[in-house]
Amino acid sequence: MKEEQTSKSLQSVLSGNGLSGFSLYLAQFPALSDQLRDGNVTILAPSDAGISAYLKSGEAVGNYSAELHATIQYHVLPGHLTRSQLKQTQQFLPTLAKDTPLANVTGGQKLQVYSDGQQITFQSGLKRNSNLTSTDDLQFTGPNGAGGIVHIIDSMLTLPLDLITTAKRTGISNFVDLIVSLPQDPQYQGYRDGTIFAPNGTLPFTSNFTAEALYAMEAYHVLKGVFFSPDLTDRKVYTTRNGAGVTITVQDGDTYVNDAKIIASDYLISMGVMHILDKYGFSCRFIGTTPFTIASLTEVMVDLFLRRDPEHALLNPVGKATCQLEHILG
C-alpha cells in the first residue's frame, strides 16, 4: 500500500525526496516560499544532482538575485497537475514567472510539456529538456487545507532569454545583425506578448536601405500575440506589429509564413515565442499583380525599391511594407 501523502507539508515532501538543493533556493525567497507552501500549485523540483550540474555549468545565476527568483518561479505551475494530466498532447503551460523585464508574457512565462506516452519532458528556454523522474504525484497540503503536487525533474529549467540572446545562441546571425544595426526602436521598449519569425537567410544590400525600411522589415516579422506551432493552422491570417497581414499555409507537413518555410519552431523567449524561417517573409505587392517576397527578387530590384531614392521607393509613415513600383514598371 502506498504511503498516504496528502497530509504532508511541502517542506516534508522536499526533505523526504532528496530535494535539499531546491529547498535551499526556496529559503532565499520567503514570500515565494510561503506562497508555495499554501498549495494550489504544481512544483517541478530539480533533483540535487540536477542542481549540482547546474552550479557546475557556468550558467548559474547569483543567489538572492532577481534572476534566481524568476527562475524558481518558472519551476511552478498554477493549479494541481497530475502525471496523467501532463501526459496529454503537447501543451504550453503558464508558470508563476511574471516579473518584468525577465518575463514579458501575460499570465506568466510559458513552459512546453510533451510526452511520448511514457516519458514526460519539459522544454524550457533555448529548447533545453528536463525529464520528469518521479513515478508518483508527491502531494502536500497547505496550512489552509489546499493541496499541491511536487514532481521531480532531472535538471534545472532555463528561464527563456531575450530575443537577441536566444537568436545568437541559436545561430541566427543575419537576423541579429539586422536588429542590432538599428537604433533602439522606442516601440520595442517593454514590448510583450509577441511572436517572432526570425529569418535564417541573408538580405542583400542592407547598407542601401533606409532606417524606416529596416524597421518595417523587423516589424513585419513580429506578430501581436503569442502563437505557438499548434496555433499556426492552414489559411490563418495574422496581424504583424506594423499592421500588415501574413498568411499561414500548411502543405505536406510543412508550415509556411507567406512563402517562407518554418524550419524550427517554439523557441521560448522572454517576450513570447520565436519561430525560425528559411528566408525573409517580408512581402510587397506589384501594382495589379500578386504578392512576392524580397527573397524572390533580383538584387537589382531590391536595390531599386528599398534604397534611399524617393523616385523608386515609398514606405508609408507607419512603416507598413507597401512597395509602389510604378516608376520601375514604367
Image: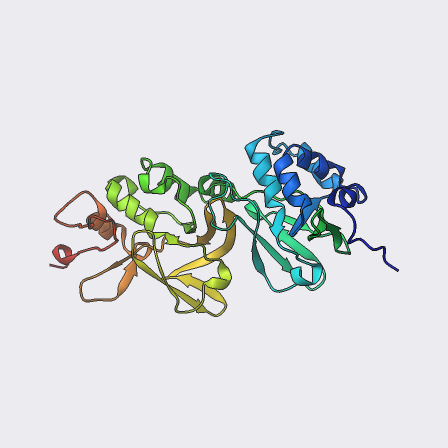
Vertical placement of 318 versus 88: above or below?
Answer: above
Q: Position of residue 107 (x, y in %)?
A: 50, 51
For residue 235, what is the image quadrant? bottom left
Question: Which of 37/109 is in front?
Answer: 37
- Depth check: give the residue in front, 202 or 144: 144
Vertical arrangement, residue 167 with respect to residue 226, above or below:
above
Describe the colour scheme in one phrase: rainbow
Placement of 205 over or under 276, stated as above or below: above
Q: Give 79 or 234, whichever is nearer the viewer.
A: 79
In this rendering, the count of numbered labels is 0
Measuring from the top left, give residue 53's x and y in whole percent.
70, 37
Picture quarter with the N terminus: bottom right
Q: Residue at x 25, y 49 (%)?
A: 319
Q: Is residue 256 left or right of residue 140?
A: left
Looking at the image, residue 269 sits to the left or right of residue 311; the answer is right
Q: Is 176 placed left or right of 38 in the picture?
A: left
Whether residue 209 is visible: no
Can residue 103 be seen in this snapshot? yes
Q: In what quadrant of the picture does the C terminus appear?
A: bottom left
Tell which of 184 and 33 is nearer to you: 33
- Looking at the image, which residue is at 48% across and 56% down? 263
| Residue occupying the far front of the picture | 144
Q: Residue at x 25, y 66 (%)?
A: 290
Q: Which residue does the image show at 73% across and 50% down from the upper left?
A: 141
Residue 179, given in percent of the width and then of the height, sits at 37, 41
Indicate the position of residue 159 as horizontal and vertical percent values: 56, 42
Picture quadrant of residue 262: bottom left
